[in-house]
Amino acid sequence: MAARLLPETALTALGRWWARNEVMYPEGTPGAHTISYVPARWAQITPWPAGLAGRSHAGEAGVSRAQVALIVADALKRGIPREALIATYVWGKGKRGTPGGSGPSTLQRILTAENLDAALTASVTTLQERGAKEAYAVLHQAVPGLGPSFFTKFLYFTGQALPTVSDPAPLILDGRISRRLRSLASAIGRETGIDPDGSVAAWAWGDWNWSAHRYNVYLSYMHAATCQVASTGTWPSYTTPDLLECALFNGAWAT
């Protein structure tokens, strides 16, 4: 994948996706990407971020990436990293979070971990000082119940909140994105004969628990692929890799 990057079919699909979504993301960032959630379903979760709708709200509410980044920046400034985690977790779960379900109940268990605040604080410091790969390693298998699909959201929004973060900056990596990468890697493996049955792609891009090395491979790939697609003229030349991640999440280059 590193040598091939995006095939022509993916580049064409991305161009079509941008043509449909340019109005939504005029600055070439996915800040307007909004997720719907039901605040009342998270009634037992504290500390509840003030930037989210009140938990007495029984209907749906929406929160964008830009809004989550502001919530995270405020929480980190006040030294409450778990509040930042809550905001990113609720955004990540969206309407899938149900009372007693895998969203609120899992988050509640995560919040009871004795080492949670220390692990989150260490990851923020590491991200500032040593970069995304090492910050990922700090959180990998560190807190029971907090897997990469959600702690990479915390790292991504933390990277948005910090004044400076060295490249490659953190991005979200979850099961949906991994499946897109596995499909793409399988297609390239068949075309090149390197991985004719897709077994290597399946091993490298499983559904969860990626190593820090694999996360760094993902970041490097996404940064390189962003340069590639930006050179086509059908993608904004001023964009950052998180727009490509957003497109990937939304299936823009499913193969």
Image (spheres, helix red, strand yellow):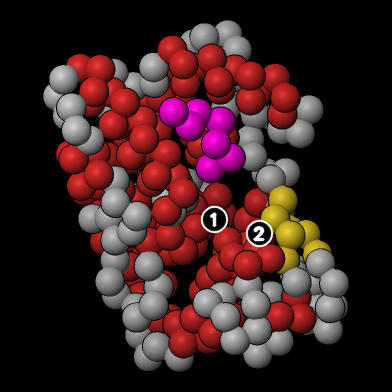
Q: CA distance from mark 2 to mark 1?
A: 7 Å
Mark 2 highlights which residue?
Answer: 68
**Quadrant of residue 114 within the rendered picture:** bottom left
Q: Is residue 155 above or below residue 110?
A: above
The part of the chain drawn in magenta is: 249-255
Does residue 245 belong to the magenta stretch?
Answer: no
For residue 70, side relative to residue 211 (left or right): right
Residue 255 pos. (x, y %): 44, 28
Q: Residue at x 59, y 86 (%)?
A: 100
The residue lying furthest to the front in this view is 197
Q: Residue at x 41, y 24 (%)?
A: 225
Of residues 197 and 46, the one nearer the viewer is: 197
Of residues 202 and 248, the one nearer the viewer is: 202
Of residues 159 and 32, the one nearer the viewer is: 32
Q: Is residue 178 above or below residue 6?
A: below
Tag 1: residue type?
Phe
Mark 1 highlights which residue?
Answer: 157
- Judged from the image, the secondary structure of the residue bearing numbered disc 2 is helix
**Quadrant of residue 134 within the rendered picture:** bottom left
Q: Are marks 2 and 1 in contact (CB under 8 Å)?
A: yes
- How packed is label 1: few (under 14 Cα within 10 Å), some, or many (20 or more)? many
Residue 221 pos. (x, y %): 34, 32
Q: Is residue 111 above or below residue 79?
A: below
